Image (tube, rainbow, N blue to C red):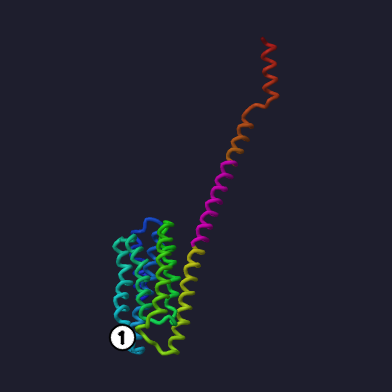
Amino acid sequence: MIKGFIEKIAHSGISFAENSHDRKCILIINRMSMILAVLMLMFVALVPVLKTYDMIYFCVPFFFAFSAAPFFNSRGWLTFTKWFFTFTPLICLLIVCVFNSIDLGDRFFFFTTATIPILLFRKTWVIYFVFYINVVAFVFASWYQNTHEPILHLPKQMESQYYYFTLISVFAVLFFVIRYFKQDSDAYEKELQEKNDLITEKNKEITDSIKYAKRIQQTLMPKEKHIEKNLKRLKENK
């Protein structure tokens, strides 16, 4: 039942996809939105344990923000959802960097948010534009965390665990992006190979048909020596 519910959310708006790229975008947005929404809920659950009650102020709103992306897709608003999902994690990450210490490594997540436009957009200028915004956000977050005291303070041991969790998460997301592009590239290469094989097969069929027709034609037509003999006989009769 739970699996069916998750799949239903993951495929929200899939009927509005006009091509394979739109379909991939919808699936990526819906699945990543669910992961991020669950992550926000996990942070909320940890609030009483860590006594970081200020986290509720951004975890709860962003839980609803990430949950809204599949809903937007279900309405057929794919273009809007692309931009919404591009900037929502970016804004969320900026707020997290304001709350947390530089030692927690949250700013490295900008390496992952910078990959989102590569997955969702085809226009080069859009990809470069959003990537540049992520670079600026990374520089700003690094400067801010170096020059301002964090709002949240975690125990030293927990800071170390949080830092390594952050690095593992960043590598996991980058691996997902690279794997996605490799699969997409392999699928495109396979499709091209299948088309080439089909064209080769059709060409062979056409060539075989031409050869077969030529053999029939040669069988039906009289041989050259018979034509010359008949022509010679006609001339003699004249």
Name the residue carrying label 1.
Answer: 53
> Would residue 13 be found to the left or right of residue 114 on screen?
left
Residue 162 rendering spot, x and y as whole percentages:
44, 83
- Residue range corresponding to the magenta coloring: 184-207
Question: Is residue 189 located in the magenta-colored stretch of the structure?
Answer: yes
User: Quick one: which residue is furthest to the front in this view?
Assistant: 147
Q: Quadrant of residue 133?
A: bottom left
Residue 145 rendering spot, x and y as whole percentages:
40, 79
Residue 198 rendering spot, x and y as whole percentages:
54, 50
Question: Is residue 215 located in the magenta-colored stretch of the structure?
Answer: no
Which secondary structure lies at badge 1? helix
Q: Tag 1: residue type?
A: Tyr
Q: Residue at x 36, y 68 (%)?
A: 30
Q: Residue at x 40, y 63 (%)?
A: 130
* Category of crowding for the residue at label 1, using alpha-carbon neighbours closer than 10 angstroms: few (below 14), some (14–19), many (at least 20): few
Foreground residue among 48 and 183: 48
Looking at the rendered image, the quarter that the C terminus falls into is top right
Q: Quadrant of residue 134?
A: bottom left
Looking at the rendered image, the quarter that the N terminus falls into is bottom left
